[in-house]
């Protein structure tokens, strides 16, 4: 099991390095070729837009052998990337957009496929810890890979980055082939449920997966909603250069690494719902700290938000892995990714518009929305817990009353039956007095 855990962490390191480096360089490359910042930003949209098709793409993983499919997707990505070697001028910019879309589709399939493969390679008790390690590895690569990719681009140009990025999926495919699957799920679904409805019904039809997914979606959406506000805080409120945003990104990345390393133990001690609630609260406190007009607190808030976000994400992924039928895990995982990251498509533009009201209102709104989600979750869990407790007590009371043949209390009174005269108790055999009628 430790061998498989190490392989999955290595897969996260290699895939995170290649994708992070190429994602940054794609935008820089388009900007150098066209001089348009709008076109450069569209490269990122091409990468993230396919996540909206997750419920449909995830069904492919449930209709085909998952590991061969994930390996094939990585090899196809490695075959597509060299097409960028033909980019020589503005006329070939469309190739960068096409490859960015291919990256986006591969993200959906590979992420969902890896989530579906983990329960077949690891015991359920280790899923939370390994998911946390993977999160730390990916966040670590987000700190290292962009610098390495930008440096290589400045030194040798975009073609060198293409060659490096194309080698990563090949190595990842080799590592997937080396994973030992001990509990391989059947290749075909046993239930005749196809299409996106199957993933949606399983994901949102049970509290164990619905609550962590909603908490993660709220936190991730609010991180995108508050991005423009953070920029404004740094430039207009703190009067710091834009390069200070790199300091905040590094602080958030460091917090994410630490959060990913400890979240596995928290999930084993609590449960995914509790960890998701704690992560949402930490992210809200991080947003609140960024409102204060002192840059050390702003850095601390970024680190705190960096701890909270991986907690919500890892809790949601672990809940999906442990509470989803194996035959539907591919489409449910892809649907979960859509539910968690899809709202960013709306949240980011809304945050950019809301910042015209000032830097702090969007941050305060993010805090309120996150805490409201946690409060609603806590109230619902408490009400259900009380309902179950009352039902359990009522069941015990009724059982006791049946054994003792005595009336229940006011909350659990049973019909004593028709009035009868003195007789003998059916259980104790003692003489009884007549019961009053009415």
Image (spheres, rainbow, N blue to C red):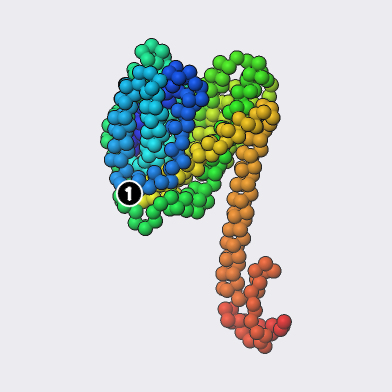
Residue 68 in view: yes
Q: Where is mark 1, residue-wise?
A: 63
Question: Above or below — where is 130 with respect to 302?
Answer: below
Disc count in the image? 1
Residue 148 in view: no
Q: Which of 180 and 356 is in front in this view?
A: 356
Q: Position of residue 185 (x, y in %)?
A: 32, 49
Q: Position of residue 26 (x, y in %)?
A: 42, 23
Per the image, label 1 sits on a secondary structure element best described as helix
Q: Nearer the viewer, residue 270 or 214?
A: 214
Quadrant of residue 50 in the image? top left
Residue under the image location 60 percent in, 34 percent down: 350
Q: Quadrant of the N terminus?
A: top left
Q: Residues within 10 Å of mark 1 (few under 14, many from 20)?
A: some
Quadrant of residue 73 in the image? top left
Single out the residue that lies furthest toward the top: 155
Residue under the image location 43 percent in, 25 percent down: 23
Question: Above or below — where is 36 with respect to 206?
Answer: above
Q: Where is residue 431 in the image (x, y as percent from the top left)?
A: 64, 84
Residue under the image location 35 percent in, 18 percent down: 88
Q: Which of 414 and 43 is in front in this view?
A: 43
Left or right side of 72 for 310: right
Q: Nearer the viewer, residue 361 or 204?
A: 361
Q: Position of residue 288 (x, y in %)?
A: 65, 30
Left or right side of 99 for 207: right
């Amino acid at each position: 099991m430790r061998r498989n855990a190490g392989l999955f962490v290595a897969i996260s390191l290699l895939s995170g390095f290649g994708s992070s480096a190429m994602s940054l360089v794609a935008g820089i490359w388009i900007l150098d070729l066209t001089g348009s910042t709008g076109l450069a930003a569209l490269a990122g949209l091409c990468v993230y837009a396919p996540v909206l098709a997750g419920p449909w793409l995830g069904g492919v993983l449930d209709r085909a052998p998952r590991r061969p499919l994930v390996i094939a997707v990585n090899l196809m990505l490695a075959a597509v990337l060299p097409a960028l070697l033909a980019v020589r001028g503005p006329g070939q910019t469309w190739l960068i957009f096409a490859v960015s879309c291919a990256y986006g589709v591969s993200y959906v399939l590979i992420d969902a496929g890896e989530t579906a493969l983990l329960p077949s390679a690891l015991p359920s008790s280790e899923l939370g810890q390994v998911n946390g390690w993977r999160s730390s590895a990916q966040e670590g690569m987000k700190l290292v890979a962009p610098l390495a990719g930008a440096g290589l681009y400045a030194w040798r140009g975009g073609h060198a980055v293409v060659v490096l990025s194309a080698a990563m999926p090949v190595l990842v495919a080799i590592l997937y082939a080396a994973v030992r699957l001990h509990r391989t799920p059947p290749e075909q679904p046993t239930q005749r449920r196809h299409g996106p409805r199957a993933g949606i019904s399983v994901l949102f039809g049970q509290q164990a997966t619905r609550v962590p997914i909603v908490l993660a979606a709220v936190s991730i959406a609010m991180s995108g909603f508050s991005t423009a506000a953070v920029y404004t805080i740094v430039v207009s409120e703190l009067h710091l250069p834009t390069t200070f945003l790199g300091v905040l990104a590094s602080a958030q990345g460091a917090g994410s690494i630490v959060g990913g390393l400890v979240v596995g133990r928290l999930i084993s001690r609590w449960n995914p719902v509790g960890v998701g609630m704690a992560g949402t609260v930490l992210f809200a406190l991080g947003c609140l700290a960024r409102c204060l007009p002192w840059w050390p607190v702003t850095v601390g808030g970024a680190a705190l938000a960096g701890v909270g976000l991986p907690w919500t994400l890892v809790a949601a992924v672990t809940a999906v892995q442990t509470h989803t039928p194996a035959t539907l895990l591919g489409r449910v995982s892809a649907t979960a990714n859509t539910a968690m990251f899809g709202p960013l498509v709306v949240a980011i533009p809304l945050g950019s518009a809301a910042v015209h009201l000032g830097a702090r209102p969007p941050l305060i709104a993010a805090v309120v929305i996150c805490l409201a989600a946690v409060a609603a979750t806590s109230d619902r869990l408490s009400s259900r817990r009380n309902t179950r407790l009352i039902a359990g007590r009522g069941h015990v009371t009724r059982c006791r009353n049946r054994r003792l043949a005595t009336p229940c209390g006011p909350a659990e009174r049973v019909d004593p039956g028709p009035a009868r005269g003195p007789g003998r108790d059916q259980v104790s055999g003692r003489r009884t007095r007549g019961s009053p009628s009415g």
